[in-house]
Image (cartoon, rainbow, N blue to C red):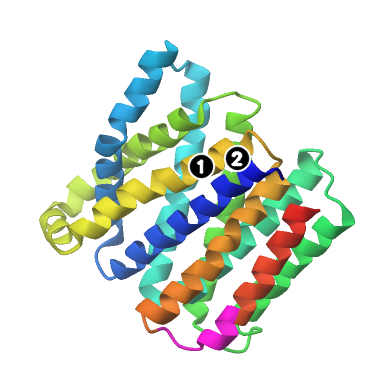
Amino acid sequence: MSLFPLVLVLVAAIAHASWNLLSKQASQADGIVFLWLVAAASSIIWGPVAIGYLVVTETAPTWTDAAVITGSTLLHLGYFMLLQRGYRDGDLSIVYPIARGTGPMLASAVAVLFLDEHPAPAGVAGIVLVGVGVFMMSGGGAEGDLRGIAFGLATGVFIAAYTVWDAQVVGAFAVAPILLNYGGEVGRMAFMTPLVLGGRRPLIGRVWREHRYRVLGAAVLMPFSYLLVLFAFTMAPVSVVAPMREVSVLVAVVLGGRLLAEGDLRRRLLAAGVILGGMVTIALS
């Protein structure tokens, strides 16, 4: 991986861990309402950027663009809902590393099996290290919050799915990353609106009053972090970018241990370090 996409991925990792901290802090609120508010705020905040792109480039989305963006939106919707539900039951420093470690490991495997990417032996070793780190993070199957672990693993499946799908959207389908990102925000808001207005309307005001700064912070950082990753996908293979961005697991474990007072910090940092070592091995292969 060259220097520029590496910098993009590392900045994205810090932003990604930061918005996950905000989501964890709001995890006891209604998850659907919180995610809907974030998507609505993102649609407003990032709207001028998307419109400006269309005006400057003089392009218009096609029906094919809309179809593949819709597929991405549904995958991301499943990801966000599982992640937020996991944060209700489990620690940030457990759910996040397991989800982020499982996702790229599966994404790399799919890239090798179906996208004709061929990592070097060091890359394969890195993928194995990521798997070992995830196993350590779960307590070796003997300890830890089992519900949080289960939601982390399920979230990782969706991470793998949208990672591979979105890499093809910005690659093979040549959809601009900013359009994919913004279309996903608007799409999630649209898909969730019937759920929110159908039975959760009274909760909107309360969730907004209690978590408005977290909503606005996540609304800025969610698209920003993934936009950087989408640009990196246009410059480097999926099997390299997907694992390398997971340096955020180390950031998340530190945030969880220091700011949220989550326990067992030493073991979780060790497991995060193994995951990080695997990702660095993959990136340098």
Left or right, 221 with respect to 70, comes to left
Whole-percent x and y of residue 259? 36, 77
Q: Residues within 10 Å of mark 2 (few under 14, many from 20)?
A: many
- Rounded to the nearest angstrom, the CA distance separating label 2 from label 1 is 6 Å
The magenta stretch is: 262-269
In front of the other: 149 or 44: 44
Question: Is the residue 283 above or below the residue 62 in the image?
Answer: below
Q: State which quarter of the image contains the N terminus.
A: top right
Q: Hey, which quadrant is residue 170 in on the image?
A: top right
| Residue 241 visible (yes or no) | yes
Taking the spot 21% from the left edge, 58% from the top edge, the residue there is: 213
Q: Amino acid at mark 1?
A: Leu
The x, y position of residue 248, in whole percent, is 53, 62
Residue 278 x/y as whole percent: 72, 65
Q: Which mark is residue 175?
A: none
Q: Is residue 271 above or below residue 205?
A: below
Q: Is residue 210 left or right of residue 125?
A: left
| Residue type, label 2 | Ala
Q: Residue at x 34, y 29 (%)?
A: 49
- Asked whether, in this view, residue 191 is left or right of residue 194, the answer is right
Left or right, 73 with respect to 157, comes to left
* Residue at screen point 12% across, 60% down: 209
- Which residue in the protein does label 2 denote? 232
Residue 192, percent across and down? 30, 45
Between 50 and 173, which is closer to the camera in this rendering? 50
Q: Which residue is mark 1?
A: 228
State if disc 1 and disc 2 touch (CB < 8 Å): yes
Residue visible at 27% across and 71% down in the picture: 28
